[in-house]
Image (cartoon, helix red, strand yellow):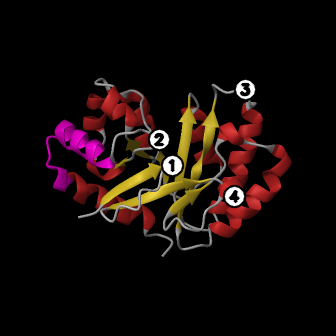
Amino acid sequence: MTFINLHTHRYSADSEILEVVNQYPWEFSAQIPQYSIGIHPWYIEENHLSSDLQVIQEKLKDEKCLALGECGLDKRIEIPLSVQTKVFQQQIELVQQTMKPVILHCVAAYQEIIALKKEMNIQNPMIVHGFSKNEQVAKSLLDNGFYLSFGKYLLRNPDLEKVFKFVPENHFFLETDTIEESIFQVYQKAAAVKKLTVEQIQQQVAQNFEVVFKRDK
């Protein structure tokens, strides 16, 4: 059975893994078989924002493009939140022309993301990648229809195990992002925490992936 890696910055070409490889519009590679594309808040450049958005609009029509992202809001960087919000909204307007999901980068801006989801009436599935917060934040996101993806912090932070146990089976994904550990190691950790087999975790993530990513087919 395939291992699904919800978010990675490195394409491994491993036949056992379905990878959603993060791509940026200014350095797009057509060699990657499945990808997401978006403007990360760290890398907003207003001098080529218009062309970046055009590339995103074009690629969202591509079957190989599985999702918008990563994109979102980050309160711990110098780029003003107002600028980040505008760029995020522009990307959401593009993905709303499809039903493709959104892979979110969110740092200290969960209430803002929830508010924007309501304000813009976003029906596209939204997945917070690299989730590392407490059960209260997780519950707030889950109650508002978000999915959560776990990777680095599940491996690194024992306190997150309780949160991962709390997340319903039909609302989580697994990822590697930029870590050196393999997606197999992430699945092994997830299985240990949930007290399931790796195969059961594979089956659950595959079911979740089918539900969230099938909508634009």
**Cβ–Cβ below 8 Å for labels 2 and 1?**
yes
Q: Which residue position is annotated with label 1?
A: 9
Which one is in front, 178 or 196? Answer: 178
Cα distance between the residues tagged 1 and 3: 23 Å
Q: Nearer the viewer, mark 4 or mark 2?
A: 2
- Label 1's element? loop
Cα distance between the residues tagged 2 and 1: 6 Å
Q: Nearer the viewer, mark 3 or mark 4?
A: 3
Amino acid bearing label 2: Thr
Asked whether 110 falls inside the magenta stretch, the response is: no
15 is higher (above) or lower (below) than 87: below
Q: Nearer the viewer, mark 2 or mark 3?
A: 2
Magenta segment: 183-200
Amino acid bearing label 4: Glu
Q: Earlier in the sequence, mark 2 or mark 1?
A: 1
Q: Which residue position is annotated with label 2?
A: 178
Q: In the figure, residue 162 lies in which quadrant?
A: top left
Q: Which residue position is annotated with label 4?
A: 93
